[in-house]
Image (cartoon, rainbow, N blue to C red):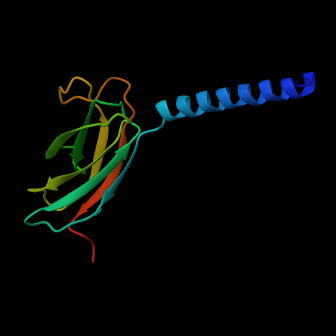
Amino acid sequence: MFSKGKLAFIYGMVALGVFGLTDIMFLTAFAEPRVDISPTCGPAEPGFNIVINANGFKPNSNVDVKFVGSDSKIPLYTQFDTNSTGGFNDVTFADDLKADHYKLYLADDSNSDGIFDIGAKRVYANVTIPCEK
């Protein structure tokens, strides 16, 4: 029914499809974490909501979120659960933060102990309080 050339071509295309799908799954599983926040600045009082959209973390796990001030202190800390693809889209309330330039660090915390997992890749976004005029 099929000549040897056509059969070889069909098998080749199937192999490429399988390997291509495997590559996509492998790259997705080991994607670099990333984070987008909105807004990136806010008023000093009385506080404000920050929407966090994060991806690339461990699936069905926990991610720690820490506000780190320019003095290296952590005045605010929270944690979010990741979905089956290692992401989350949630809101945190930034309150009682003094005027400063903060780094909002995120990293995996599988056992919810408040400490980033050893070897976990960290990402951050900048937050300024108050907004610059």
- Residue at the location (8% across, 56% down)? 96
Q: Nearer the viewer, residue 91 or 24?
A: 24
Total numbered labels placed on residues in the image: 0
| Quarter of image, res 120 | top left
Q: Nearer the viewer, residue 126 or 87?
A: 87
**Which residue of the protein is positioned furthest toward the front in this rendering?**
1
| Quarter of image, res 36 | bottom left
**Which residue of the protein is positioned furthest toward the bottom in this rendering?**
133
Task: Indicate the position of residue 42 as horizontal and vertical percent values.
Answer: 21, 66
Task: Indicate the position of residue 6 as horizontal and vertical percent values.
Answer: 88, 28
Q: Nearer the viewer, residue 84 or 6?
A: 6
- Residue at the location (88% across, 25% down)? 2
Task: Indicate the position of residue 94 as horizontal and vertical percent values.
Answer: 15, 56
Q: Is residue 42 above or below residue 118?
A: below
- The quadrant of the picture occupied by the N terminus is top right
Q: Is residue 110 above or below residue 46?
A: above
- Residue at the location (28% across, 48% down)? 104
Answer left or right for 119 relative to 94. right
Answer left or right for 85 relative to 94. right
Residue 101 visible: no
Answer left or right for 29 relative to 123. right
Residue 6 visible: yes
- Residue at the location (50% across, 35% down)? 28
| Quarter of image, res 9 | top right
Q: Is residue 59 above or below residue 88?
A: above
Answer left or right for 30 relative to 104. right
- The quadrant of the picture occupied by the C terminus is bottom left
Task: Indicate the position of residue 10 as horizontal and vertical percent values.
Answer: 80, 28
